[in-house]
Amino acid sequence: MADQRAELTWTEDQIPVSDRFDDPYFSLQNGLEETRHVFLVGNDLPVRFKAGFRIAELGFGTGLNMLTVWSEWERSGQTTPLSFTSFEAFPMLPEDMARALAAFPELSPWSDRFLAQWQCGTCDLGTLHLEVIKGDARDTLPNWTSGADAWFLDGFSPAKNPELWGADLMQQVAEHTTTGGTAATYTAAGFVRRGLQDAGFAVTRSPGYGRKRHMTRAVKT
């Protein structure tokens, strides 16, 4: 099957919006702070960092989440590689990534290194081993032979992209999570929380970022 690429419209503030899902790739308020609040705090990072730590993600998008956690990995003094695997059905062109990431100059020491090597697939950046698995996660995740200590569940809105939030996929997330591993997402949709609970996670609704009242944190029991 031919590669399917992200189809984008740009807001006046240069934030990419998915034409397919009619949803922005990151918060219109402050995408970097949202990522820190939801995915770092939501997974108790960076305090859980250790050699061999593995993160997995549903929805690579602009690469913002990866760059944010990679920067914290290096800032925390880690010297061994962080393993980061993301599942992405509609990868963004590198030039579009660069345009989007220009909004976060604080991350430029990491985004510049990433973009200089990125071809979509695997990327060895020394302190980061990145793998982006292309295709529908419902098809690709069951075939993944590894697991994660923390998950970033970052698909587009469940109302607009329900395929990435179904119970069967949440079960696969659980099966690819270490015991005591975590998952976090910006959404507090009831069917997402129930899917995680049924899959074996202890689920907590927590304060969200910005105008989002709540988000979801989960620990595999």
Image: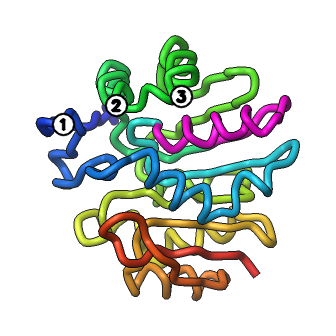
Q: Which numbered mark, 3 or 2, is in the foreground of this view? A: 2
Question: CA separation, marks 1 and 3?
Answer: 29 Å
Residue 13, which numbered label? Answer: 1
CB within 8 Å, label 2 to label 1: yes
| Residue at 75% in and 27% down | 127
CB within 8 Å, label 3 to label 2: no
Q: Is residue 203 above or below residue 60?
A: below
**Boundaries of the magenta span:** 64-84
Q: Is residue 157 above or below residue 140?
A: below
N-term mark: 1 or 3? 1
Residue 167 in the image: x percent, y percent? 47, 78
Q: Nearer the viewer, residue 198 or 35?
A: 35
Identified by mark 1, the residue type is Asp
Q: Is residue 176 left or right of residue 87?
A: right
| Residue at 26% in and 50% down | 28
| Residue at 51% in and 61% down | 38
| Residue at 52% in and 79% down | 206
Q: Is residue 73 magenta?
A: yes
The quarter of the picture where the N terminus appears is: top left
Residue 15 in the image: x percent, y percent? 24, 39
Q: Write down the residue under mark 2.
A: 103
Residue 121, which numbered label? Answer: 3
Question: CA separation, marks 3 and 2?
Answer: 24 Å
Q: Nearer the viewer, residue 141 or 148?
A: 148
* Residue with the most extreme right position: 51
N-term mark: 2 or 1? 1
